[in-house]
Amino acid sequence: MLKNVMKIAAVGAMMLGASSMEASAFPATAQTGETVGLARGAPLPEGVYFVNTLSWGVRNTNPDTKLLVDIPVIAWSTPWTILGGNFQLLGALPNAHVDAAGGADNYGLYNPFAAAALAWDLGNGFGVSYLSGFYFNAGDKNIRVRATTWRQDFAASYTGDGWNLTANLLWGITFDTDKSVGGKTANGFNLDLTATKTFGKWELGLAAFGSTEYDTPGGRPKQKQFALGPLVGYNFGPVIMQAYLTRDVWQRNLGGKETRLWTRVIIPLWTPAAPAPIVTKY
């Protein structure tokens, strides 16, 4: 078993969502950077968890575009294994507030999500996972991506000696697209990267992410970006909190660079035994 605080935090890697009005949201519906800071490849201890990620960003689009995203999720790490992997189930009801260039100001629910995942402990601090789930074509018409999206995640983590070194590749494929958007929406990839180290109850390190489209509607230019910034976390035992600040260092066809502040809280709602402080032992 991987006995690392980021094992618990990995559940937050399944928090999903972004606004259809936010140009930097790829693939299709997943918010770029949302799994940063999480050991997505590590198996989770059995239990039920509430995870909330809240972020607010400003993109320099002249006038600026502002986007607030809140992603509450319930995740269940089951006692079962499939093909030797820890079996997990989750659901999310994300919300967004978009204050876009041109005067659009909208708030509402977007694209409810349900997924299942498998995570394998490979030993010596290494783990890998696979997630498969769907964003449903539902929610506020001014907020949601007007399509159903199949999302797949492929993650690898090293969590030995207090480290969290994780790469998570997200792949989004859209279908069942509303006719109002011309029968097609963008498909693409996200790559979320984490390099952090725990020092007692503190966690310090670097957050980074990139995104690219490979299929766009109507021949629209493909949008791409790469952002990075510092991350800090604190383990209150059993509650975990994280925050990171990111800034685009490179972008194409997004209208300008974005600065975004992220916060995350992870709360165990139920575990098989009485919850104890989540600590790293080395």
Image (cartoon, rainbow, N blue to C red):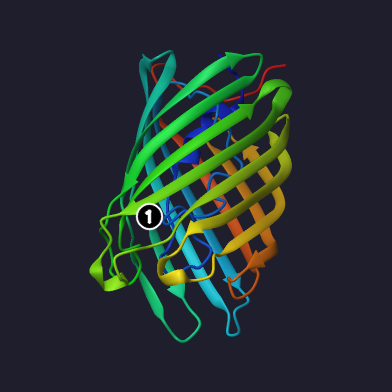
Picture residue at 62% right of the left edge, 53% below the top: 210
Dividing the picture into quarters, in which one does residue 187 lie?
bottom left
Image spot of residue 188 (x, y percent): 49, 53
Judge whether 80 appears above or below 68 on screen.
Answer: above
Picture residue at 32% right of the left edge, 72% below the top: 142
Picture residue at 60% right of the left edge, 18% below the top: 3
Q: In this view, does 232 lie to the left or right of 108?
A: right
Picture residue at 48% right of the left edge, 78% below the top: 100
The C terminus, quarter of image: top right
Judge whether 86 appears above or below 109 on screen.
Answer: above
Q: Can residue 270 be seen in this view?
A: no
Q: In this view, does 139 lie to the left or right of 231?
A: left
Image spot of residue 177 (x, y percent): 28, 61
- Pick the front one: 223 or 100: 223
Task: Identify residue for label 1.
Answer: 94
- Pick the front one: 266 or 195: 195
- Pick the front one: 2 or 188: 188
Image spot of residue 119 (x, y percent): 47, 24
Q: Can residue 142 be seen in this view?
A: yes
Judge whether 182 appears above or below 185 on screen.
Answer: below
Q: How crowded is mark 1: few (under 14 residues within 10 Å), some or many (20 or more)?
A: many
The N terminus, quarter of image: top right
Mark 1: secondary structure: loop
- Pick the front one: 58 or 202: 58
Circle 1: residue type: Pro
Image spot of residue 224 (x, y percent): 60, 61
Q: How many marks?
A: 1
Instruction: In the displayed orientation, state which residue is furthest to the front.
Output: 219
